[in-house]
Amino acid sequence: MTIEPHPLGFFLPKNTRLLMLGSFPPPRRRWSMEFYYPNIQNDMWRVLGLLFYASKDYFLKDRKAFCVEKAKAFCQEKGIGLGDTAMEVIRQKANASDKFLEVVRPIDPEKVLPQIPACEAIAVTGQKALDTLLPLLPVSETPKVGGSVEFCWGDKSMRLYRMPSTSRAYPKPIEEKAAIYRTMFEEIRIL
């Protein structure tokens, strides 16, 4: 089995108030852009388009690709950082499923969080991301899907949100996923 290093660096605008963490990007053959949530089958950019621009197609460049420039500009404007909880993995099957990802090296919050001092919250976007991050944070309880828990990082109070996966393998209509994400963005005062 080959150890696969993370192909993207963290995207951390200086004004990052929310750090959204997935598990790990899909294989490159599934990418429609060189950025986070690149798989055209993943609904993250559709959820964000629906919430912020009333159009699930807002971030599409065409039917087969997302527009990386729009995605980056949006994150910079709103103060949303993006990354993943796994820095190195072994894919036990050559697909995008988190179920077959073995995390070899997880994120190091001690290196990432000091880069974004205005960050108030972390959102994990799926179960694998939660399972990877939870042991690395001083969190006393596990948040429910759509919920959050408070934790202290140094002398700072932060929130950890557990959001539903935007993968189409997670069988929930996009409108229902968007409603759950809306609550988080409203609580953080980004929406």
Image: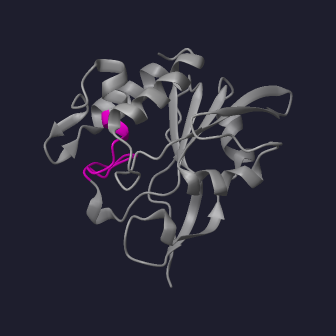
**Residue visible at 36% across and 65% down in the picture:** 27
Q: Is residue 126 visible?
A: yes
Q: Position of residue 40 (x, y in %)?
A: 26, 49
Rendered image quadrant of residue 59:
top left
**Residue visible at 69% across and 27% down in the picture:** 117
Q: Residue furthest left?
A: 63
Q: How is the image coloured?
A: one colour
**Residue visible at 42% across and 78% down in the picture:** 93
Task: Judge left or right: residue 182 versus residue 149.
Answer: left
Residue nearest the viewer, comparing 20 with 14: 20
Residue nearest the viewer, comparing 115 with 191: 191
Q: Which residues are magenta?
A: 32-46
**Residue visible at 31% across and 27% down in the picture:** 49
Q: Position of residue 100 (x, y in %)?
A: 49, 72
Figure check: 72 above or below 172: above
How many numbered marks are there?
A: 0
Task: Judge left or right: residue 182 versus residue 41.
Answer: right
Q: Is residue 80 magenta?
A: no
Q: Residue furthest right?
A: 155
Q: Is residue 107 visible?
A: no
Q: Is residue 37 magenta?
A: yes
Rendered image quadrant of residue 189:
top right
Residue nearest the viewer, comparing 155 with 173: 173
Q: Position of residue 46 (x, y in %)?
A: 30, 35
Task: Judge left or right: residue 83 versus residue 26.
Answer: right
Q: Residue furthest bottom?
A: 1
Q: Position of residue 173 (x, y in %)?
A: 34, 40
Majority secondary structure of magenta residues: loop
